[in-house]
Image (spheres, rainbow, N blue to C red):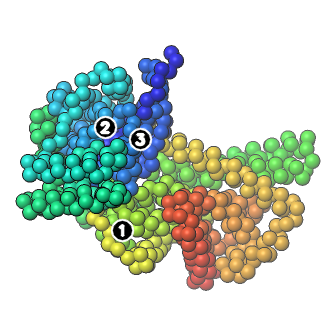
Amino acid sequence: MKAKQHLAIALAGNANVGKSAIFNQLTGLNQIVGNWPGKTVERAEGKLFFHGYTIHVIDLPGIYSLSTYSMEEIVSRDYIAVERPDVIINVVDSSALERNLYFTLQLLELEAPIIIDLNQVDFAAKKGIRIDTGKLSTTLGIPVIPTVATTGTGVEELLLGVICVVEGKAQLKPLKVKYGKEIESRLEKIESLVQEKVPHLCEIYPSRWTAVKLLERDPDVIGKVQRYKEGNEVVSLAEASAIEIEKIHGENSPVIMASERYRIANSIIKDAASIIAPPQLTLEEKLDEITAHKIFGYPILVAIMVAMFALIFVGGDFLTRGLEVIFDDILIPTIANVLLTVLPSTIVDIVCGGIISGISAGVTIALPYIVPFYILLAILEDSGYLPRAAFLMDNLMHKIGLHGKAFIPLMLGYGCNVPACIGCRIMETERERFLAGFVTVLIPCAAVTVVILGLVGRYVGLHAALALYVFDLILILVLGRLAYRALPGEPVGLIMEMPPYKKPSPKNLLLKTWSRTKDFVYIAFPLIIAGSVVLESLSVAGLMQPLADLMNPVITGWLGLPPESGIPLTFGILRKELTLILLSELVSPKTLPQALTATQMIVFSLVTMIYIPCIATVAAMIREYGWKRALAVTVLDILLALLLGGIAFRLLPS
Ligand SMILES: Nc1nc2c(ncn2[C@@H]2O[C@H](COP(=O)(O)OP(=O)(O)OP(=O)(O)O)[C@@H](O)[C@H]2O)c(=O)[nH]1
Ligand SMILES: [Mg+2]
């Protein structure tokens, strides 16, 4: 059937309720889904066709309320009010209805056309929560459709619901949120002043909503109103009214408004939901108790981290050895022999030494460590362990002026610094976001792990590799502390919900690992091959020596590394695993342990770990923090790497 019409629908709701899981079901795309709040930081868009409609779906970042606590909240709120999607699907976690309805009430105040996706009904049922969908729908005056995003149950009904709303077939009588009398009388006055003094703003935001936000002293809305000439008058009236209701209630006005909304949410739930089974401590809850325990939690955290790296090391080492036999001993010589029969030997050198050994190095050195790493990281993400780790790390993070939540981007940084750097948007203030980004780019990503485990772990020992990771953490604490001194300010309190533990879905694990590996292959392999071809051509052209001589004072004189290391380290700016891959190509036919001493391997890895985050991370930093800050961080990291590398060379036994 030909598409009749275009529709825009947006998925909005609290963090970690399953918006992206629904989005993936609707669009067949592969947005990151995981069990910790704050994964989606930028809106994602997708498309589907349904009943003759072309439906554009937007996955919004999760929010706790529509008050301005962080960037993603303003993004979502402005999107809803300004761009006005045809329908907003408010995804709700049915196992935490109260907190979720609080958000729903705010959406209703924005007077947006909404339908409720009562998601995670399977999980709620497990907790013994039963929700009367019909009653909930009647009370709220909007359609309510139960779904299970992980399996796709109810998704079709959800779309039918959307169409009903669009075609005007659904009977909508959205609930009007009513506050106490003393508040309502004042709201009325503020609202009419809003209509009178800032009529243009009323074209974008409902006047009652603006009045409510002004009474709550929402800084963003105050700013918006004050942009108009007569806006100050409105703000003054709202402020005077806020002071009056504060006198009556003896609380701050935002607190008063929030507790009013909770009162309403509560009374709705009392009507529509019931707990049928007495709560018992499930396995997941027991697990929660010990892993977030204030004493036992820490050894468990350390054990998990060490076990994770040991496992990646053992698995990676095993795979590397196997693949090396296949590629280096069988495949490459065979291909070279075949090519030599048809091509001149210089070209065969470039093809075999460049392209084929580039691919072989990528496959044998990088993939064996990266794939197990991505799988384990996905398990940590999907089980719900990350926020527990963040909770445990709260104290330590405060020492560097951040709160525990920053630990989540830090952990993700071990996978790749780019999403981790963007993920720092979950921090509440601009200052914290930058601080978190600054320390996040110092985390050794999967590519650096390839170098650390594939070089130091493999030839010096796992203890030395782990020591590098520990050293990195200490460095982060020290630098974080220094940066905190330079950028003073107190971290705001930790506002993060603790999602329940969930059994990771194998399908999601595989999808996520596959999509990350795919990204890696698509981005890294062309670079690895190009790098290898350039190296091989340089050496065929006899340019290798002059270049090495140029870098000699720093590489050999200061860092004590073999002269061949300079060029791989330069290429590492593109991708960090290139350093090891190109080095191993350059020193052949010698093997790495013949070419480098243990100390040289450690210095080489240390420099790779700290110096300039790769080019993709620099680009992410420029986008997030502007080029000045990105440049400052980059220069600082390079100097630091050289400084520490030189010191390590002098301190370690040669
Ligand atoms: N049991 C169950 N789990 C679900 C369901 N929907 C989502 N989940 C899980 O809930 C977690 C959060 O899902 P996401 O789709 O990432 O949530 P989100 O709302 O996009 O989260 P943010 O982007 O962080 O705001 C994941 O671990 C999902 O596997 C559901 O219907 N049932
Ligand atoms: Mg999401």
10 Å crowding of disc 3: few (<14), some (14-19), many (20+): few
**Position of residue 585 measured from the top left corner of the image (x, y, whole percent):** 74, 59
**Position of residue 545 measured from the top left corner of the image (x, y, whole percent):** 83, 70
Disc 2 secondary structure class: loop
* Amino acid on which the number 1 mark rests in the picture: Leu
Q: Tell me the mark number nearer the camera, choosing from 2 and 1.
A: 2
- Seen at 75% across and 77% down, the residue is 552
User: How far apart, in angstroms, are the residues tagged by discs 2 and 3?
Assistant: 11 Å
Q: Which residue was labeled with disc 1?
A: 402
Which quarter of the picture shows residue 96? top left
Vertical relation: 504 (above or below) 577: above
Vertical relation: 24 (above or below) 351: above
Disc 1 secondary structure class: loop
* Amino acid on which the number 2 mark rests in the picture: Ala
| Camera-nearest residue between 84 and 69 | 84
Q: Earlier in the sequence, mark 3 or mark 1?
A: 3
Q: Quadrant of the C terminus?
A: bottom right
Q: Tell me the mark number nearer the camera, choosing from 3 and 1.
A: 3
Q: Earlier in the sequence, mark 2 or mark 3?
A: 3
Disc 3 secondary structure class: helix
- Seen at 25% across and 60% down, the residue is 233
Q: Which residue was labeled with disc 2?
A: 112
| Camera-nearest residue between 317 and 288 | 288
10 Å crowding of disc 2: few (<14), some (14-19), many (20+): some
| Camera-nearest residue between 64 and 605 | 64
User: How far apart, in angstroms, are the residues tagged by discs 2 and 1?
Assistant: 36 Å
The answer to whether residue 213 shows anywhere in this view is yes
- Seen at 35% across and 74% down, the residue is 489
Q: Which residue was labeled with disc 3?
A: 83
